[in-house]
Each structure stands twice: as structure tokens, then as C-alpha cells.
Image: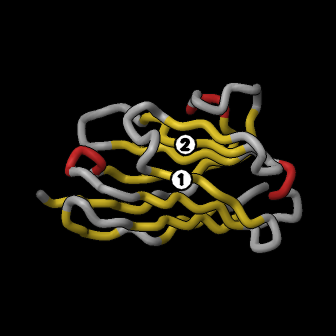
Amino acid sequence: QVQLVESGGGLVQAGVSLRLSCAASGRTFSTKTMGWFRQAPGKEREFVAAITSSGRNTYYADSVEGRFTIARDNAKNTVYLQMNSLKPEDTAVYYCAADLKFYSPRDRTAYNYWGQGTQVTVSS
């Protein structure tokens, strides 16, 4: 079992930066691909970014490429999402996900574990 706890969300103005954190329980964190997804009201949960267990490979949605950066610290069992140049359309609940059932990091159905989410609201 893996428990995930997100933090770092908030209400910010467009153009600023925010960093989300996801702390994971368990001793096998360093072996798991981690992902970030988001869900805006009335919309489906969508892929944002993912990072492989070693951190060597990262994946991004086109909408955040160049603005967001995913990183991990395996010593701290934590994955981060650095979000720069935030836009109102980035407003959503952001979820951390862990442990792929099959290798498709962009697919929300591929993940075994999910956090409870953290709200990010970007005002114009």
C-alpha cells in the first residue's frame, strides 16, 4: 500500500509560480513511476506530468510543457511539481498518482494509488 499526500496548492494570480509536493509512504517509493494529474470543474481528470523511478525520464502534457517541471527526491519519498507562469486555465484540483499497473504514464487508468488532491486557483 502507498499513501500519497499532496500539499502546496492555493489561490494565486496569473503569472506567478507555485510548487506542489506529494509525500508518499512506504519503502518502495524509489521504484515507482509518479504522476501528476488535474481535474477542473465539469471536466475529466487529465494528465499533467510524470517521472520515472530514477527521475531519468519525464513526460509532460502539451499544455504545460516549458512551464511546469516534475522532479523527485527519493531520499524524502517526495515528488514535486514546479509550476511557473501560471494561467487561469491551470485552475484545477491537482492529484498525485503512483505505481503503474501497465506502462502508460499519461494514462490515468494506469495508476494504482492516488492522493486526495490539492486545489490550485489562478486568478486573472
Query: Residue farthest to the front?
Result: 66
Q: Is residue 5 above or below residue 44?
A: below
The percent position of residue 75, horizontal first and vertical second, equals: 82, 71
Instruction: Give the total of numbered labels.
Output: 2
Q: Nearer the viewer, mark 2 or mark 1?
A: 1
Left or right: where 36 falls relative to 122: right
Q: Nearer the viewer, residue 68 or 49?
A: 68
Q: Is residue 19 above or below residue 35?
A: below
Label 1 Cα neighbours within 10 Å, binned few <14 / some 14-19 / many ≥20: many
Quadrant occupied by the N terminus: bottom right
Q: Tell me the quarter of the picture where residue 73 sits.
A: bottom right
Q: Nearer the viewer, residue 1 or 91?
A: 91
Residue name at image x 42 percent, y 36 percent? 45
Q: Nearer the viewer, residue 88 or 103?
A: 88
Residue name at image x 59 percent, y 64 percent? 22
As shown in the figure, which amino acid type bears the numbered disc 2?
Ala
The percent position of residue 20, horizontal first and vertical second, equals: 49, 65
Residue name at image x 65 percent, y 68 percent? 23
Q: Earlier in the sequence, mark 2 or mark 1?
A: 2
Mark 2 = which residue?
49
**Disc marking residue 69:** 1
Q: Is residue 61 above or below residue 5?
A: above
In contact (CB < 8 Å): disc 2 and disc 1? yes
Cα separation between marks 2 and 1: 8 Å
